[in-house]
Image (cartoon, rainbow, N blue to C red):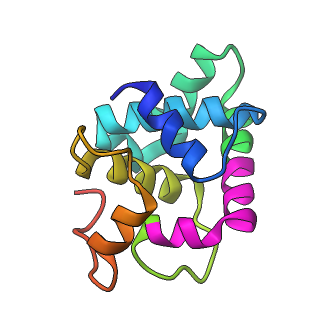
Amino acid sequence: MVLTEIYDLLYRLGITANYTGFFHMGYAVKLCCERPERLLMVTKWVYPEVAKRYQTNGRAVERNIRTVGKVLWEQNRPALEQLAGRPLSDKPGNAQLLAMLSHCLLVQPASEAACSMEGRRGRWAGKPSEPWPP
């Protein structure tokens, strides 16, 4: 998975590069797309790798990804629900958000725009997707 595709998805969701979490989230999603089992233990298998790349610590990575999730929840909840393929009663946690973003990028063919919100709505509305992680 190329980071530019992930960044494009984040921009489509309304998350911009003025958040440090934008880059942390992007790299974390890349790691999860490469090996989805990392979603099982994000604090041990994802945050430390992201922290190493950005010369910070796992707690800062977790906080910055949480901030991105909060912004997404507060400013673009409908797009987040389309991405999830269902209504959300609570803000998703970091691992859930990483799983949704990774799933979106893995199921869409590379030729399509990265998880266009219109495509998600038509393809997933009213029909639950396969369990994630597999």
Decide if residue 63 is on the left or right side of residue 36.
right
**On-image quarter of the C terminus:** bottom left
Residue 129: percent from left, percent from top: 26, 71
Say whether residue 70 is magenta.
yes
Residue 76 falls in image quadrant? bottom right
Decide if residue 17 is on the left or right side of residue 43.
right
Decide if residue 1 is on the left or right side of residue 45.
left
**Figure disc tally:** 0
Please report the residue visible at 66 percent of the width from the left and 44 percent of the height from the top.
65
Q: Residue furthest right?
A: 18
**36 and 15: which is toward the camera:** 15
Residue range in magenta is 66-82
**121 and 73: which is toward the camera:** 121
Say whether residue 23 is magenta.
no
**On-image quarter of the N terminus:** top left
Residue 132: percent from left, percent from top: 30, 61
Please report the residue visible at 28 percent of the width from the left and 78 percent of the height from the top.
128
Please report the residue visible at 38 percent of the width from the left and 52 percent of the height from the top.
115
Residue 120: percent from left, percent from top: 36, 65
Residue 101: percent from left, percent from top: 44, 51
**8 and 95: which is toward the camera:** 8
Please report the residue visible at 59 percent of the width from the left and 83 percent of the height from the top.
89
Main secondary structure of the magenta stretch: helix
Residue 130 falls in image quadrant? bottom left
